Amino acid sequence: MLNFVLILVFISIILGAFRFFKGPSSPDRVVALDTLTTVLSVTFVIGALFFDNKVLLDISFVFAALSFTSVIVISRYLEGDNS
């Protein structure tokens, strides 16, 4: 089961990276960045379950919070709301 999940994660990383580098517009790239960071956070959770390591869960939560904040900042910058 773990192999199947890792294959799906790898496919989603490939598709997200393709959209990030080939995206026709900046908002598409921001959505792809958000998708990639979410998949990476899920990868940390899978690693925490597989290795029985609770530290990876903490890393995943902090990474998810920071990536959410960065996507919001980038989105506001692209929107033109610099206040």
Image (spheres, rainbow, N blue to C red):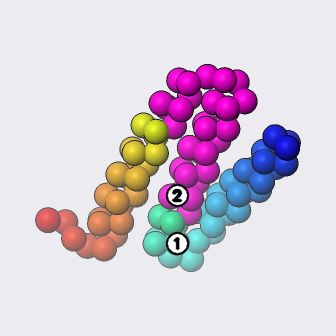
Q: In x, y percent, where is residue 55?
A: 53, 23
- Name the residue beneath numbered marker 2: 33
Q: Which one is in front, 44 or 27? A: 44
Residue 1: x and y in percent read 85, 44
Which percent across, then down, holds residue 40?
60, 45
Graded by Cα atoms within 10 Å as few (under 14), some (14 to 19) or many (20 or more), the crowding at tag 1 reads some
- Image-based side of 66 in relation to 22, left or right: left
The C terminus sits in image quarter: bottom left
Q: Residue at x 47, y 64 (%)?
A: 30
Disc 1 marks a residue whose amino acid type is Asp
Gap between marks 2 and 1, in whole Å?
9 Å
Residue at image x 56%, y 59%?
A: 35
Q: Mark 2 vs mark 1: which is more N-terminal?
A: 1
In this view, the residue in front, 34 or 74, is 34
Q: Which residues are magenta?
A: 32-60
Element on which disc 1 rests: helix
Q: Nearer the viewer, residue 66 or 77?
A: 66
The residue tagged 1 is: 28
Per the image, label 2 sits on a secondary structure element best described as helix
Q: Nearer the viewer, residue 40 or 47?
A: 47
Is 58 on the left or on the right of 1, as rendered? Answer: left
Using residue 9 as the reference point, say whether residue 57 is left or right of it. Answer: left
Decide whether the magenta segment is chiefly helix, strand or loop: helix
- Magenta-colored stretch includes residue 64: no
